[in-house]
Image: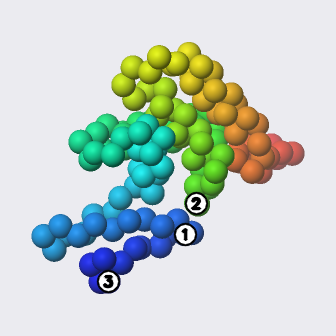
Amino acid sequence: MPEDDVLTTEGEQTEVITTEGEQTEVNPLLAPVKMALRVSTTAFDDEIESLIEAAKLDLGVAGVVLPETIDALVRTAVITYCRARFGQPDDYDRLKAAYDEQKAQLSMCTGYTNWGDDVGQV
């Protein structure tokens, strides 16, 4: 693959960065989350990526099965989670409540859970 290509995986575009001959995939949610946080430096990328993964895990604990291609609803929930937990936001309570509502809505949708797959089975 040429060094400046963009790798497409299951409908998502993942940026591939080549440094000294080594390719590294960049989380496709990193750029939108950084934009929402108004962060332009790479100094916080590790922390932000940890928050993104924590958001995905938190959604999973609530029974949300993430689609192969992250859609707008999941992306918004992840962004809200990250905004609530990055730094010390003045509106933490509002952001936490918004995320909890998004998580609850996703956990009740059949398109985001697999609880409907076992209905009627013993």
| Residue situated furthest right in the rendering | 120
Q: Residue 29, image x and y in percent?
A: 46, 51
Question: Mark 3 to mark 2: distance in Å?
Answer: 23 Å
- Mark 1 touching mark 3, by CB under 8 A? no
Which residue type carries mark 1? Glu
Q: Which mark is residue 1?
A: 3
The quadrant of the picture occupied by the C terminus is top right
Q: Between residue 113 and residue 78, name the one nearer to us.
A: 78
Mark 1 Cα shell of 10 Å, populated few (<14), some (14-19), many (≥20) = few
- Mark 1 touching mark 2, by CB under 8 A? yes
The quadrant of the picture occupied by the N terminus is bottom left
Residue behind mark 2: 68
SS class, disc 3: loop
Who comes first in sequence, dot 1 or dot 2?
A: 1
Which residue type carries mark 3? Met
Residue 1, relative to residue 12: is it above or below? below
Residue 113, relative to residue 10: is it above or below? above
Look at 43% across and 37% down and name the residue there: 37
Question: Mark 1 to mark 3: distance in Å?
Answer: 17 Å
Closest to the camera, between mark 3 and mark 2, is 3
Question: Mark 1 to mark 2: distance in Å?
Answer: 7 Å
Which residue type carries mark 2? Glu
Residue behind mark 1: 10
SS class, disc 1: loop
Mark 3 Cα shell of 10 Å, populated few (<14), some (14-19), many (≥20) = few
Q: Which mark is residue 120?
A: none
Look at 68% across and 28% down and name the residue there: 101
Q: Residue 40, image x and y in percent?
A: 33, 46
Q: Between residue 39 and residue 100, name the one nearer to us.
A: 39
The colouring scheme, among rainbow, by chain, secondary structure or one colour, is rainbow
